[in-house]
Amino acid sequence: MTLIILITIVLVMATFFVHQAALSGLARSIPIGAQSSHPWFYLLMLGIFAAHIVEIILFAIGFYVADNLFGLGTLEGGSAEGAMGLFYASAVFYTSLGFGDVLPNAQLRFLASIEALNGLLLIAWSASFMFAAMNRSWHCFSGKGPDDPPA
């Protein structure tokens, strides 16, 4: 059990780092403000989407390592075979969809449950980042500051 907890902690910290680096990089490189236009929104969304894909891949690698190198459990179901199957399973867990066609057993259940919580937090972080970015942009177009009272 100690090994799966260690693998999970490493994955959670790695995904936090990836997400923070992605959002910081996007905040620095995409003009949000008076000079911004509609294309920045699409670049921002694509950057956030790419960060989530990388995080899902990290967890898929974690499932592979935990199963094939350490024998801590398996992902049962025909949809979990091969690299795309691991990615699919990780995406289902990360987004908390829970289709039920891929089931983790043994200690991989712990990793899958923490991935769902981690995905929920990172998706919420992305949503709040987008809200803040769009709020700042809308205030620039309206001529009011973000702290000004509504009309």
Image: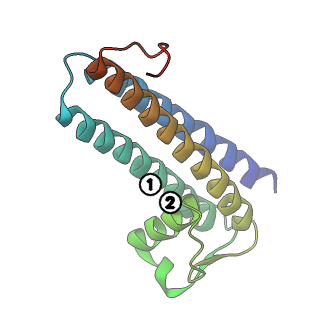
- Count how many numbered circles sit on residues in the image: 2
Left or right: residue 36 compared with residue 108: left
Whole-number angstrom distance, CA of label 2 to CA of label 1? 5 Å
- Give whichever of 94, 131 is nearer the camera: 131
Which quarter of the figure has residue 40? top left
Residue at horizontal 47 percent and vertical 22 percent from the top? 150
Q: Is residue 11 above or below residue 107?
A: above
Q: Residue at x 55, y 58 (%)?
A: 94
Choose between 144 and 9: the one closer to the eye: 144
Report the residue that reaches farthest toward the front: 151
Question: Mark 2 highlights which residue?
Answer: 60
Q: Is residue 67 above or below residue 28?
A: below
Report the residue marked by disc 1. Answer: 57
Q: Amino acid at mark 2?
A: Ala
Residue 18, above or below 92: above
Residue 46 point in image, percent of width and height:
29, 44
Q: Indicate which disc residue 108 carries.
A: none
Q: Is residue 80 shown above or below 52?
A: below
